[in-house]
Image (tube, rainbow, N blue to C red):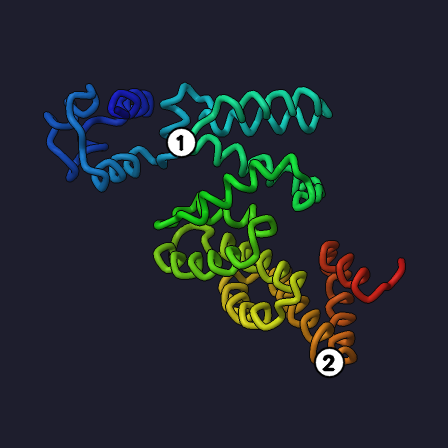
Amino acid sequence: MYGKTIKEIRIKKYLSLKMVYSGICSKTNAIKFEKGLRQISIDKFLKVLDNLTINFEELLWIHNGCMPSPTSKLSYELTTLWNEGKVSEFKKYINFIRKNSTGMDKVKLANYVLLKEHSDGKNLENNNSNEFYINIITNYLSNLQYWTIYDFKTFNNSCYLIPYKLMIYLLKEALRAQKRYLFFNNMNQILYSILSNCIDRMILEKDFNNANNFTKRLDEISLSINNLEFRLLNEYYKAKIEYLTTNKINGKKRLINILNTANILKVSQIKNEIKSLLKIKG
């Protein structure tokens, strides 16, 4: 189905059939593929894209007439309405999509709405109007048999909202599934975000045993990412757990040291959280 688009790209880049298909398939099969009369296997298809110096995401963009996918367009339109303060129009649009969407469209909508409102500081757990969306995400994640990148991100966006026991179970499943994506682009950052959000919720739920255990895994990932802010966040979690559980005095000393480092690195999230925890003004 993408043969004609690939032909268009190839011609506009002044690339011959030989330059794109050499070692992949015969000239006859290449011509049939570009006419939409023949398919090629996925491994050969990816080699063609590599020879065109584009990835599949860019191919889709060109194939769609240089327009976003329906999901990306939906996200853009909703974000625009929200950012422009058109709350009533935003809600009308959401209700329209809610009534007319099915299957994965409902999951994508729920994921978007919950992420948007959570990022804007809304208390979703006590907001009955969002129960519909939380249930959609909960049901979707509960029935996962095979994780893809979208599922990791969906879990990350909703780990504060789904039932706590389900969050713990899904975190373990995500860590198992992550092994398949060991060398996938940005996978460590995605998993770091999942772990840090889940650990934060564990601390909120006073499940310090699990929180302490998962900080060890977070340590491993933060080292592979080589990001000072990520490492500092994990040190904050460990110091916070110590402050709230085993050694308040030593935990406080560690938190103050982390606060000083956060001031130097200008990491406002950690700085504000420590000040709130230790009731430091200014």
Q: Residues within 10 Å of mark 1 (few under 14, many from 20)?
A: few
Q: How crowded is mark 2: few (under 14 residues within 10 Å), some or many (20 or more)?
A: few
At x 37%, y 60%, the residue is 179
At x 47%, y 59%, the residue is 169
Q: Residue 117: where, in percent of width, then height?
A: 66, 38
Q: Is mark 1 on a helix, strand or loop?
A: helix
Which residue type does callout 2 highlight? Asn
* Left-right relation of 136 to 3: right
Residue ID for mark 1 = 58
Q: Residue 192: where, in percent of width, then height?
A: 53, 58
Q: In what quadrant of the picture does the N terminus appear? A: top left
In depth, the one of 243 and 185 nearer the eye is 243
* Left-right relation of 61 to 112: left
Where is residue 3, by image quadrant? Answer: top left
In depth, the one of 173 and 63 nearer the eye is 173
Q: Residue 137: where, in percent of width, then height?
A: 50, 42
Q: In what quadrant of the picture does the C terminus appear? A: bottom right
Q: Residue 280: where, in percent of width, then height?
A: 86, 63
In depth, the one of 88 and 186 nearer the eye is 88
Q: Say above or below: 263 vs 53.
A: below
Q: Say above or below: 268 vs 218.
A: above
At x 38%, y 54%, the residue is 181
Residue ID for mark 2 = 247
Label drawn at residue 14: none
Label 1 close to label 2 by CB (< 8 Å): no
Which residue type does callout 1 highlight? Glu
Where is residue 237, by image quadrant? Answer: bottom right
Where is residue 45, by image quadrant? Answer: top left
Of callouts 1 and 2, the N-terminal one: 1
